[in-house]
């Protein structure tokens, strides 16, 4: 929902959204984007070797770009290189800030199970796995490079401790108080904080509207074999879905961060 909101709010004259033409920039892990910046193929490199090159790619992109852009990232905030060469994956000198959308892990595990085509128990286990990553192959030809996720708590902490301007926004607040929350987002992202434009953008990006668009036109980010990308989007679905044991496991694994974010009484 946030990526679609940025797309709509970037233009003073909003128009009906095209899910497959979101003008929010290439995902930070895009293989072709990184290759073009570096000037050579990544096909023969290992994921570790690619990781060490990503900061250079971002610096080059910044040097040839007149205006800053908005780029989605799934990565935890990690460091690459060793010794004096150790540096953040996303260099501070070319990163203006980061908007971090966080959601109650009790609901995340259900959505993640659907997205990953696995059981909820498997999803819960993956969310507590420190070596969790996307596109985790030694030598692969995927359209994205590897992205370290770590555990859910480690991912959150990594961005909480990042040496960047980071704004945390809870998914639940986006749903319960959308205008206030997205006004803050617009201000942070240096987008027009205009009441009429924000209200129009929110209407165009209502979850039900996005679901309808996906049914009509499809959505290329939907994983193969998954019925829909925009599944439910509701808050508190875990109460009707998870067993007591599953809830207890998640709370045990992530209680500290959950408490810090207001997800536990």
Image: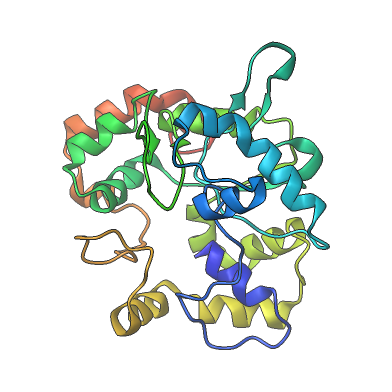
Q: Nearer the viewer, residue 187 or 225?
A: 225
Left or right: residue 138 versus residue 48 is left
Left or right: residue 78 versus residue 242 is right
Query: Please, is residue 85 above or below residue 239 in the view?
Result: above
Q: Nearer the viewer, residue 192 or 79?
A: 79
Quadrant in the picture for the C terminus: top left
Residue 251 in the image, given as x and y percentages of width and height: 34, 28
Residue 246 in the image, given as x and y percentages of width and height: 21, 33
Please say whether residue 90 is visible from this viewpoint: no
Measuring 29% from the left and 80% from the top, which residue is drawn there?
215
Q: Give the residue furthest to the top.
A: 83
Please say whether residue 78 is visible from this viewpoint: yes
Coloring basis for residues: rainbow
**Quarter of the image where one finds residue 166:** top right
Q: Nearer the viewer, residue 171 or 147?
A: 147
Measuring 54% from the left and 72% from the top, which residue is drawn there?
22
Query: Please, is residue 223 above or below residue 216 in the view?
Result: above
Query: Please, is residue 190 above or below residue 116 in the view?
Result: below
Residue 219 in the image, given as x and y percentages of width and height: 36, 72
**Quarter of the image where one finds residue 220:** bottom left
């Amino acid at each position: 929902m946030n990526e679609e909101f940025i797309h709509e709010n970037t233009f003073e004259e909003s128009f009906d959204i095209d899910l497959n033409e979101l003008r929010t920039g290439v995902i930070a892990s895009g293989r072709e984007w990184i290759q073009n910046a570096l000037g050579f193929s990544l096909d023969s490199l290992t994921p570790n070797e690619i990781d060490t090159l990503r900061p250079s790619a971002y610096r080059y992109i910044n040097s040839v770009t007149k205006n800053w852009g908005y780029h989605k990232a799934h990565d935890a905030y990690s460091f690459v290189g060793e010794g004096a060469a150790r540096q953040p994956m996303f260099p501070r000198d070319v990163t203006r800030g980061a908007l971090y959308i966080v959601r109650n892990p009790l609901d995340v595990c259900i959505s993640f199970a659907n997205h990953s085509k696995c059981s909820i128990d498997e999803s819960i286990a993956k969310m507590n796995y420190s070596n969790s990553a996307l596109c985790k192959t030694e030598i692969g030809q995927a359209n994205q490079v590897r992205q370290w996720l770590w555990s859910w708590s480690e991912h959150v902490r990594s961005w909480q401790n990042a040496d960047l301007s980071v704004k945390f926004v809870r998914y639940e607040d986006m749903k319960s108080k959308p205008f206030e929350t997205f006004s803050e987002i617009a201000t942070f992202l240096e987008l027009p904080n205009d009441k009429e434009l924000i209200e129009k953008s929110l209407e165009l990006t209502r979850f039900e509207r996005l679901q309808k668009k996906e049914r009509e036109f499809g959505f290329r980010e939907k994983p193969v074999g998954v019925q829909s990308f925009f599944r439910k989007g509701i808050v508190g679905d875990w109460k009707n879905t998870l067993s007591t044991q599953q809830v207890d496991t998640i709370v045990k694994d992530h209680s500290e961060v959950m408490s810090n974010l207001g997800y536990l009484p």
